[in-house]
Image: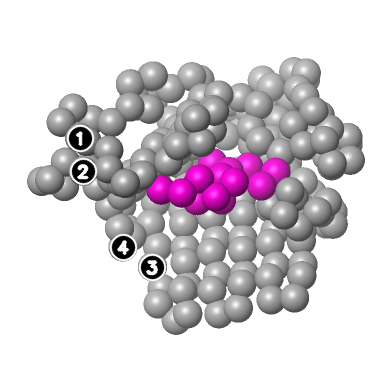
Amino acid sequence: MPRLVPLAVLLSALLLAPHPSSSQTNPDLPPDLPPGQPQIAFTLEYRLERNLGGRFDWGKRRLFVSGPHSRDELLDGELERFTVLADRDQRLVLRFEPDDPARIAKRQAWNDGRSLPLLAQGYGTVAARLGPPRLLGERQIAGQTCLRLVWEIVGERQEWCVTAQGLALAARRNAGANETRVEALLVELAPPDSSLFTLPPGFTATE
């Protein structure tokens, strides 16, 4: 896989590139918002932290996205060693552990895409459920400017930071005693190898 390089170098080339407005990818959103899903192919390394009712875990993960396809895998940390493959067009999610001796991948419910990792979802899934966000201005992440989008309802708060190309650089979700935080570390803006979006040899998908 090509060497990952800082976000500042790779995203700067796209600042002037045309991209679909939010009204094209999420018709119910105002047209001046970023697209609800990423409009570019990329490989992203990010840190994930979770507090599930007092049980804390963390990890560094790698996310590959190309069109409707995504793959999310563990690099290190205290999270489960699972990999998630998804196809938006087929509404398909497969979850497996690369070291599983049984070589089994389990299908998961699509659930409007909410079963995907946060940064693979794009914020459009949140907006479809909670409506248009409140804007809190801009934030700098890894030398890049992203727009802070916030939703607040009883018992839940979400904040995302999204570039003009629809690439989420950070997301935070609070629901009751549970909290999830993700933030980008490195990104490569190039189409990932298509073989990454298929099950490894010998694996079988089951319900």
Mark 1: amino acid: Phe
Q: Are marks 3 and 1 in contact (CB under 8 Å)?
A: no
How far is mark 3 from mark 2, CA to CA? 25 Å
Q: Residue 58 in the image: x percent, y percent?
A: 40, 62
Q: Nearer the viewer, mark 4 or mark 1?
A: 1
User: What's the magenta region?
Assistant: 108-125
Q: Which mark, residue 78?
A: 4
* Residue contact at pointers 2 and 1, CB within 8 angstroms: yes
| Marked residue nearer the N-terminal end (4 or 1) | 4
Q: Residues within 10 Å of mark 1 (few under 14, many from 20)?
A: some
Picture quarter containing residue 78?
Answer: bottom left
Give the residue pinned by disc 2. 104
Give me the C-alpha separation between circle 3 and circle 1: 28 Å
Q: Which dot, 3 or 2, sits closer to the camera? A: 2
The correct choice, above or below, for 22 with respect to 54 in the image is above
Q: Amino acid at mark 2?
A: Ile
- The reply to whether residue 74 is visible in this rendering is yes
Question: Which of 131 and 166 lies nearest the eye of the viewer?
Answer: 131
Return the mark for residue 203.
Answer: 1
Mark 2 Cα-neighbour bin, 10 Å: few <14, some 14–19, many ≥20: some
At a point 83% along the width and 51% down the height, the residue shown is 132
Mark 4 packing: few (<14 Cα in 10 Å), some, or many (20+)? few
Residue tagged by mark 3? 57
Q: CA distance from mark 2 to mark 4?
A: 22 Å
Q: Kindly indicate whether the residue at mark 2 contacts the one at mark 3 (C-beta within 8 angstroms).
A: no
- What's the CA distance linking mark 2 and mark 1? 5 Å
Q: Amino acid at mark 4?
A: Glu
Displayed quadrant of residue 197: top left
Q: Position of residue 166 (x, y in %)?
A: 69, 35
Mark 4 and mark 3 lie on one chain; the one further toward the N terminus is 3
